[in-house]
Amino acid sequence: MPGCPVPCGWGLCHFSGKPDHGKVCDKFDSISLDYFCDSRSVEHLDLIKSDVDGWDYELLLGAKESIRRFRPIVIAELNHSLGWRKHSKEDVKHFLDEIGYVHEVLDNPFPTNWLMQSKDNV
């Protein structure tokens, strides 16, 4: 789609129904996890699992207060697609340090899945 700011991953193709890997960029409304939790009076959150094709850092930023409040385990796929959004794994590490979280890489030899949890739970 002309004007798409980043190459879109396969995941966005699932929303559009168009199996054209890496070439589909449909727009759809979204809300932050913080907004979701606040607007629905969520009282408990144990786990956040995400695979959002390069939008991982933004997802974490939009969940910052919920993560601070509920201290859930977070599992996310972090790979080269972070660069599409001009972010890096170092940005995520800095974010985790700021909220008192640590991470562990779950897979090898291509470390993409991260387990993130509160330093208090380690």
Image (cartoon, rainbow, N blue to C red):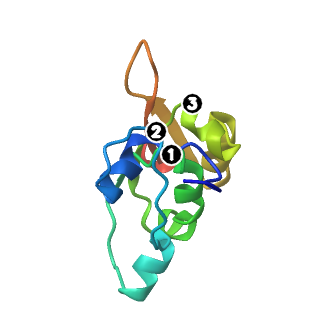
How many residues crowd around disc 3 within 10 Å: few (fewer than 14), some, or many (20 or more)?
some
Q: Are marks 3 and 2 in contact (CB under 8 Å)?
A: no
- Reading the image, the residue beneath label 3 is 80
For the C terminus, the quadrant is top left
> Residue at 50% across / 71% down in the picture?
32
Which of discs 3 and 2 lies nearer the camera? The answer is 2
Tag 3: residue type? His
**Which one is nearer the viewer's eye here, 8 or 115?**
8
- Reading the image, the residue beneath label 1 is 8
Is disc 2 placed on a helix, strand or loop? loop
Which of discs 1 and 3 lies nearer the camera? The answer is 1
- What is the tally of numbered marks visible in this picture? 3
Relative image position of residue 10 (x, y in whole percent): 39, 41
Is disc 3 placed on a helix, strand or loop? helix
Gap in angstroms between the C-alphas marked 2 and 1 = 5 Å
Q: Are marks 2 and 1 in contact (CB under 8 Å)?
A: yes
> Which of the two labelled residues, at mark 1 and mark 3, occupies the earlier sequence position?
1
Relative image position of residue 104 (x, y in whole percent): 46, 31
* Depicted 92 relative to depicted 111: above or below: below
Relative image position of residue 93 (x, y in whole percent): 63, 40
Is disc 1 placed on a helix, strand or loop? loop
Relative image position of residue 97 (x, y in whole percent): 65, 46
Q: Quadrant of residue 47?
A: bottom left
Instruction: In the rendered structure, find residue 22 and report the number of the disc placed on it.
Output: 2
How many residues crowd around disc 2 within 10 Å: few (fewer than 14), some, or many (20 or more)?
some
> Residue at 52% across / 31% down in the picture?
79
> Residue at 50% across / 45% down in the picture?
8
Q: Quadrant of residue 88?
A: top right
